[in-house]
Every structure is written in structure tokens, then in C-alpha cells.
Image: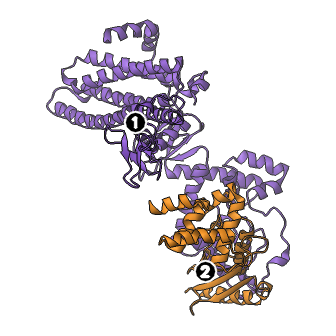
Chain colours: A purple, B orange
């Protein structure tokens, strides 16, 4: 096996290999984007850096339109942080921008419908100066505004807190809210929610989904499977959809697959493949023996499992029931057969997907034990970290390869049958074989020749990148054929 | 109970009492306890609907944070309507949820619920079974709703055929309401309803 793949490998890539080898020192960054089909430009930012970034947009907008930063935030939120677009549109039609951002109501309000003699919310009559209103002119007393904001903030609402009037969608800007909210804890909570909302509404930003992880990714493309790796928790995430990174599968497909696996939709398939409903009382029956004379446990109805006819009128005619091809139940049967087939197909892919997920977890342990083994060797004076670095690299590479392999299964599951799928499954099989070879060699690393191991690493990685190059959506011109 | 809430409810109570709808018998409002946290509403089934002539009681619970959060309202009278649960009386209405505004009042809410009886929203159902019947068999839905109005809300139209079918199940020893629910659910097919009840 390995000899054969060596041959192929040198056939295809021999020239490239030499070429790369010669100037990989000074071309490292360029090389990376070329050699790694998953390469994606992004940065990992701290909360303070993101705050600074957001503030730059806010400042830019408030300076160029001469508005308060608080209003700028409402507008940026509505326009997904595209300050340039807001400025352009504002110059064309300022009113439209204000209405779209819900700073102003679509229709100018008539002053009559909210008085300042009685507060419509609490029914009390505070003095005139204790009323306030948003741009819509709906006046309410300040105590009521404060209560309204408190209730909303406690429910986790921040950017989208609305006016208290009926059918009024005007949003309360930050300065208005903060001028009514005095409790420090509540103010802080409000600002925290505000920041989270801002990051979520910003097309270039995404929170790292790792538990308690504070890092935020920044990138400029938001479609296709885009790998970002967290500096803090090392989690691999897809920037476009926020799910765990899933190349070569695309975002829609992985969502379908994960829901499918999660919501047990296959239980339904199982039921339809292995059970039939009692023709009399419709209760679901699972056949647990060979005899086709069934008696329903619920209604005691006797019937034939094969044709679902009444057993009494059946008796002697039993052997005929399977012969009638045009029997309506045959259509039913083929439905059962189809369901059974679908179940088999799903289980095939699911078992492999699960298996690699488990292996990946075990690989994590290998990595940990390898680290301690290397440490022991270094302490015992058998070379330095640099001498054993290759082992560590091999285990890391193995993890990366297996990760990609795991995510090839949902991709294959949803692929249409055809030459492209055949090619994919051929490459998948090749990758799988090399990964198992590599896994074998990494586990027995000390007895394996270093050259052999490094060779194996190279082959496995080549297989991985070839597969990704050919099938990762934004790398192929032929992307449509791999879509569902 | 918070000061604002009690004050608001007191004023709204007065507002409802003085309103023309109360004078016209469209809506009613009563106190259940002295601390203004629970009220009972009453709305008349709107004309030209299956609910015409019926009187529907509503349970109104006023939360501590009223009017910044909506009141909790459900039908106490059993009703056959796509946006009301036939089992619990829970109502699916936007202004009782995310579209609530502090400036809304019990009067406007009661009128909105009454309007919901005239114009159901089958695409946003609370009771999927009722909504399905409403969409697929509107005539049968109308009959069923009229029958429920007659039985539970004092509506004038008695549906002889339905009463007979309920009686048949009653004779078998089934609880009356349970029988009516099963029959309504299975489009008044006696056999399917029976099967379901004895399963």
C-alpha cells in the first residue's frame, strides 16, 4: 500500500516538492495560503481590542454626521456596522436613515396623543419637568421609564429597547437609557449586553463559542467553511456559521447533518422499517417472531403480517397473499423497504462519523501522554525538545487529518450519486488508509524510524490537502455539483 | 404588589367600567381579590362568528412588574379556536407576548381578544388540531365551534347531530368533555374517536 502511494505521490507532486523545498524560508506566508486549502485570514482579538474597533466606527460616524455617539450606535446596529453606507445614505436622505434605524417614527406624531398632565403608564400626575420622550414624542414620567428599562435589561434586552407606547417601534438610545437608570449593577449589565449585541450584529466579528472563552474573531469573509482557531482555547470554529469547523462539508449541510443526528429523526425511520400499524386500532406493532399470524396486543385483532388482511378470512388463502403483485400493500412494503434502505445508509455514515469523533478524543490522550513521554526523555538526557519535536508534530498532524476525515462523512452522505461522489469516496478512502498508517506509527513512535514517520506525515497531509483542494466549495469551480 | 401596578389596575378598572363597551355588554371586568392581582374578564362572542351569543370568561393575572410586563390571560370558558388551547385556554396573541407595550390597557387587551375571535390567525396556532380543522374543513370547524359555544358559553345554536354523538360515548361511560374533545379532534367520526378513547 505505502509503496503504491509513494509512487503516485512522486508522480504528481515531485516537481512541486523540490520547488517548495528550495525557498520555503522566505516565502512562508505566501506558501501557507497556497499549500493549505483551508487557509483563511483572520485575527483573534481581546475584548478591549474589539471595543476599540467598535469605538472607531462610532467615532467616525458621529464626527462625520455631527450626531451623538449614542445615536451613532443605534444606526450602526441597524446597518450592521457599515459606517460608509450610513454616511452615503444620510447625505441622500437623512430622514430615511433615521426611520430605518428606528431613531424616528415613520410618521411624525401628532402632539395630542400623549399628554404631559398624566402619565399613561402609572396614572400619576408628576410635574411637567418630570416627563421625557424619545423622538416619537410619547411622553411618560421618568419613574416609568426607569422601571421599563429595568424590566427590559433584566430580560436581556439592550439595543432594541422600545418606546412604551402602543405600536411604537422607536428605539431608546444608550444615553437616554443611562440617564434614567441609576443602579450601578444595572448600568453595567446594560453595557455588557450592549457589547454582546454589537459583536453579534457585526458581520466581521464572532465570539469564540468555547466555554468561558473571552476571545473574539475578526475576519472579512462570511460564507463557506472558514476555519478560525482560538488563541485562548484552541477550539476550531467555522467563522461563517459558528459551528465547529467542518470542511469539506459546507455550512448548510453540516447544520442539516447535526440536526439530523441530534433530533433522532432516524427513530422514525427505524419505526417505519421495523414495525407496522394494526389495521384495526392503528397501534404500532413490532414483529418479534417468525409467525405471520399476528394478534394485536391492544385490540386482540387477528391479522396477517404480510398483507395486513383479517386472519379469519385469510386462513386457507394464506399462501396466496404474497403473490398478488398489484396488492396495495406492496406499495406500502416498498415504502418500508425504502425507509430501511435510508436507515442503512444513514447508519453507515453515522457510525464512521462517530467512530472518528471518538478516535479524535483518544488522539487527545495520545497527545497528552506523548508530551509527558517526551518530557521524560528530555529530563533523562536523551536529547532535547527539538530532537523530539517531530513526534509532537506528527501527533498534531494526525489530529488535524482525523478531524478533516470526520467531516468528510456528512459531506459524502448528502452527495448525489455519480462520478464526483466516486472520486470523493476514493480520495476519502485513501486519506483514511494513510491516517490509520500514521496513527499506527505515532502510537509506536519510539520504535519507528524517524524518516519513515516523517514520510508518512507528508503523505497523509498531502492526501488531506488534495481532498480539500478538490472539494472545499470555494476552491472548486465545480462547486454546484457538490451541493445538495 | 408594586405601587405602580395597583394604581394602574385601579385606574384601568374605572376606565373599563365607564367605557361604552361595558355599556353595550361587549366586555366586563370583575375583581377576584382585594389586592388587585387577579381579575376576571368577560367578553361577548362577536356577531357573525360561531361564537355569537356566547359569553366567555377570562382569567387575568397581573404580574408584580405590570404594566412593564403583560398581564397573564387565559380563557376559563372552553372554546374551540385555532389560537386558544382547547385544553388549557392559553391564548396566542402577540400583544400578550413580545408586542406588549406599557401603554396598553386591559380594555384594549380585552377588545383585542374579542377581535381575535372574529379573525383567527391559523398560521400562528396555539392548538394545532383546531388550526388544521380550521384550514382544511372550515365548515366543520364552524359547526364544532358553534357547538362548543352552545355547550360551554351559553350560545343559542344547539347542534343535534353532535349532541347525539356525544351522548353515544356518554352511554359507554366516557366523561362528557373527554368525549367532546375526541369527537371534535377526529372530525366527529364516532368510530375513530372511540378507538382513540379506548386505546
- Closest to the observer, A401 or B174: B174
- Closest to the observer, A219 or B69: B69
* Chain to which the residue tagged by mark 2 belongs: B
Do the residues under discs 2 and 1 have CB atoms within 8 angstroms? Answer: no
Q: Residue at label 1?
A: A316
Q: Secondary structure at mark 2?
A: strand
Q: Nearer the viewer, mark 2 or mark 1?
A: 1
Q: Position of residue A120 (x, y in %)?
A: 73, 81
- Closest to the observer, A10 or A330: A330
Query: Is residue B95 among what the camera can see?
Result: no
- On the rendered structure, is A455 left or right of B124? left
The crowding category of the residue bearing disc 2, from other C-alpha atoms within 10 Å (few below 14, some 14 to 19, many at least 20), is many
Q: Position of residue A380 (x, y in %)?
A: 13, 31
Query: Is residue A14 among what the camera can see?
Result: yes
Residue A98 falls in image quadrant: bottom right
Q: Position of residue A411 (x, y in %)?
A: 49, 30
Q: Is residue B175 above or below residue A426?
A: below
Give the residue at x 54% y 59%.
B191
Query: In this view, which residue lies farthest toward the bottom?
Result: B34
Q: Is residue A9 above or below residue A42?
A: above
Q: Residue at label 2?
A: B60
Q: Quadrant of the C terminus of chain B?
A: bottom left
Amino acid at each position: 500500500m505505502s509503496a503504491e502511494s509513494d509512487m503516485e505521490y512522486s508522480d504528481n507532486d515531485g516537481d512541486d516538492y523540490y520547488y517548495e523545498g528550495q525557498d520555503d524560508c522566505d516565502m512562508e506566508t505566501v506558501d501557507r495560503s497556497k499549500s493549505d486549502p483551508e487557509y483563511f485570514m483572520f485575527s483573534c482579538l481581546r475584548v478591549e481590542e474589539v471595543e476599540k474597533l467598535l469605538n472607531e466606527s462610532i467615532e467616525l460616524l458621529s464626527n462625520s454626521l455631527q450626531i451623538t455617539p449614542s445615536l451613532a450606535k443605534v444606526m450602526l446596529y441597524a446597518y450592521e456596522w457599515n459606517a460608509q453606507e450610513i454616511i452615503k445614505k444620510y447625505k441622500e436622505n437623512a430622514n430615511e436613515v433615521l426611520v430605518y434605524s428606528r431613531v424616528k417614527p415613520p410618521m411624525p406624531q401628532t402632539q395630542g396623543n400623549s399628554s404631559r398632565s398624566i402619565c399613561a403608564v402609572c396614572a400619576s400626575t408628576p410635574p411637567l419637568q418630570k416627563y421625557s420622550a424619545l423622538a416619537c414624542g410619547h411622553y411618560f414620567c421618568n419613574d416609568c421609564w426607569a422601571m421599563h428599562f429595568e424590566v427590559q435589561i433584566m430580560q436581556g434586552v439592550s439595543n432594541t429597547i422600545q418606546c412604551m407606547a402602543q405600536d411604537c417601534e422607536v428605539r431608546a438610545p444608550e444615553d437616554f437609557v443611562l440617564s434614567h437608570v441609576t443602579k450601578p449593577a444595572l448600568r453595567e449589565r446594560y453595557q455588557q449586553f450592549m457589547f454582546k449585541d454589537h459583536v453579534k450584529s457585526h458581520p466581521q466579528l464572532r465570539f469564540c463559542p468555547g466555554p468561558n472563552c473571552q476571545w473574539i474573531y475578526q475576519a472579512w469573509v462570511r460564507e463557506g467553511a472558514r476555519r478560525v482557531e482560538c488563541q485562548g482555547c484552541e477550539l476550531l470554529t467555522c467563522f461563517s456559521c459558528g459551528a465547529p469547523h467542518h470542511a469539506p462539508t459546507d455550512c448548510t449541510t453540516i447544520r442539516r447533518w447535526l440536526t439530523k443526528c441530534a433530533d433522532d429523526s432516524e427513530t422514525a425511520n427505524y419505526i417505519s422499517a421495523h414495525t407496522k400499524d394494526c389495521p384495526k386500532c392503528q397501534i404500532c406493532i413490532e414483529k418479534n417472531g417468525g409467525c405471520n399470524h399476528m394478534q394485536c396486543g391492544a385490540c386482540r385483532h387477528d391479522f396477517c403480517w404480510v398483507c395486513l388482511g383479517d386472519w379469519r378470512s385469510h386462513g386457507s388463502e394464506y399462501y396466496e397473499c404474497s403473490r398478488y403483485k398489484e396488492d396495495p400493500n406492496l406499495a406500502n412494503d416498498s415504502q418500508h423497504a425504502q425507509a430501511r434502505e435510508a436507515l442503512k445508509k444513514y447508519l453507515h455514515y453515522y457510525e464512521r462519523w462517530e467512530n472518528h469523533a471518538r478516535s479524535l478524543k483518544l488522539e487527545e490522550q495520545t497527545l497528552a501522554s506523548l508530551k509527558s513521554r517526551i518530557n521524560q526523555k528530555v529530563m533523562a538526557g536523551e536529547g532535547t525538545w527539538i530532537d523530539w519535536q517531530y513526534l509532537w508534530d506528527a501527533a498534531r498532524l494526525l489530529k488535524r487529518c482525523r478531524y478533516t476525515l470526520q467531516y468528510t462523512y456528512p459531506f459524502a452522505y448528502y452527495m448525489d450519486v455519480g462520478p464526483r461522489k466516486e472520486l470523493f469516496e476514493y480520495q476519502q478512502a485513501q486519506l483514511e488508509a494513510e491516517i490509520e498508517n500514521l496513527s499506527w506509527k505515532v502510537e509506536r513512535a519510539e520504535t519507528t524510524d524517524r524518516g519513515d514517520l516523517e514520510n508518512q506525515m507528508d503523505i497523509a497531509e498531502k492526501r488531506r490537502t488534495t481532498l480539500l483542494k478538490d472539494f472545499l466549495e470555494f476552491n472548486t469551480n465545480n462547486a454546484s455539483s457538490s451541493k445538495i | 404588589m408594586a405601587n405602580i401596578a395597583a394604581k394602574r389596575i385601579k385606574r384601568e378598572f374605572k376606565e373599563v367600567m365607564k367605557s361604552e363597551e361595558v355599556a353595550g355588554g361587549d366586555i366586563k371586568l370583575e375583581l377576584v381579590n382585594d389586592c388587585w392581582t387577579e381579575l376576571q374578564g368577560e367578553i361577548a362572542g362577536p356577531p357573525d362568528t360561531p361564537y355569537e351569543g356566547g359569553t366567555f370568561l377570562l382569567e387575568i393575572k397581573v404580574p408584580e412588574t405590570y404594566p412593564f410586563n403583560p398581564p397573564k390571560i387565559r380563557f376559563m370558558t372552553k372554546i374551540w379556536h385555532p389560537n386558544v388551547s382547547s385544553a388549557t385556554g392559553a391564548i396566542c396573541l402577540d400583544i400578550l407576548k413580545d408586542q406588549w407595550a406599557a401603554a396598553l390597557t386591559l380594555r384594549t387587551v380585552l377588545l383585542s381578544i374579542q377581535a381575535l375571535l372574529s379573525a383567527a390567525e391559523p398560521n400562528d396556532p396555539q392548538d394545532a388540531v383546531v388550526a388544521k380543522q380550521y384550514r382544511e374543513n372550515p365548515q366543520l370547524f364552524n359547526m364544532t365551534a358553534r357547538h362548543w359555544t352552545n355547550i360551554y358559553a351559553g350560545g343559542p345554536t344547539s347542534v343535534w347531530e353532535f349532541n347525539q354523538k356525544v351522548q353515544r360515548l356518554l352511554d359507554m361511560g366516557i366523561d362528557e368533555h373527554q368525549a367532546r374533545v375526541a369527537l371534535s379532534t377526529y372530525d366527529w367520526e364516532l368510530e375513530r374517536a372511540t378507538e382513540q378513547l379506548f386505546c
